[in-house]
Amino acid sequence: QVQVVESGGGLVQAGGSLRLSCVASGDIICISDMGWYRQAPGKERELVATTDGSGYLAGSVKGRFTISTDNAKNTMYLQMDSLKPEDTAVYYCYATWSKPCIDAPHAFWGQGTQVTVSS
């Protein structure tokens, strides 16, 4: 089992920055990748960024958001710069648990952290 806990959300003015953190604990040896989703009110959950080697960043955040990891701290970060009101959402961290701990990949989710960008 894996636990992931996000932190770093808050209220910021447009143009400002925030850094989200996601700490993984438990059987982290089987984590194959981690990433961030977000969900705005009335909208579907959207993949923002992932560490799966593809370098994926949602088009709406390219050039503004950066994903990184600190393996020594079992922590993933999402640096968010030049924030816009449309970035307002609950941001969720996930960790994918894979072989050899489990045959079929399984995602563990955090509780989410609210990011609100005022205009």
Image (tube, rainbow, N blue to C red):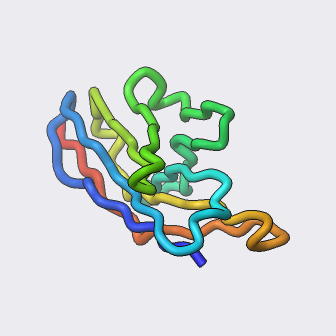
Q: How many marks?
A: 0
Q: Residue at point 40% right, 32% down?
A: 65
Residue with the most extreme top position: 63
Residue with the most extreme bottom position: 1
Front residue (pair 37, 100): 100
When the figure is inspected, residue 28 is found, relative to residue 118, above or below; the finding is below
Q: Quadrant of the C terminus?
A: top left
Which percent across, then down, holds residue 70?
Answer: 42, 45
Q: Residue at point 32% right, 49% down?
A: 20
Which percent across, then down, holds residue 16?
Answer: 19, 32
When the figure is inspected, residue 65 is found, relative to residue 116, above or below; the finding is above
Residue with the most extreme right position: 103
Which percent across, then down, holds residue 111?
Answer: 41, 71
Front residue (pair 104, 82): 104
When the figure is inspected, residue 57 is found, relative to residue 39, above or below; the finding is above
Q: Residue at point 34% right, 52% down?
A: 21
Which percent across, then down, holds residue 53?
Answer: 66, 36
Residue 52 picture quarter: top right
Front residue (pair 42, 50): 50
Q: Residue at point 20% right, 54% down?
A: 10
Relative side of 8 to 66, left or right: left
When the figure is inspected, residue 83 is found, relative to residue 21, above or below; the finding is above
Residue 91 picture quarter: bottom left
Relative side of 62 to 104, left or right: left
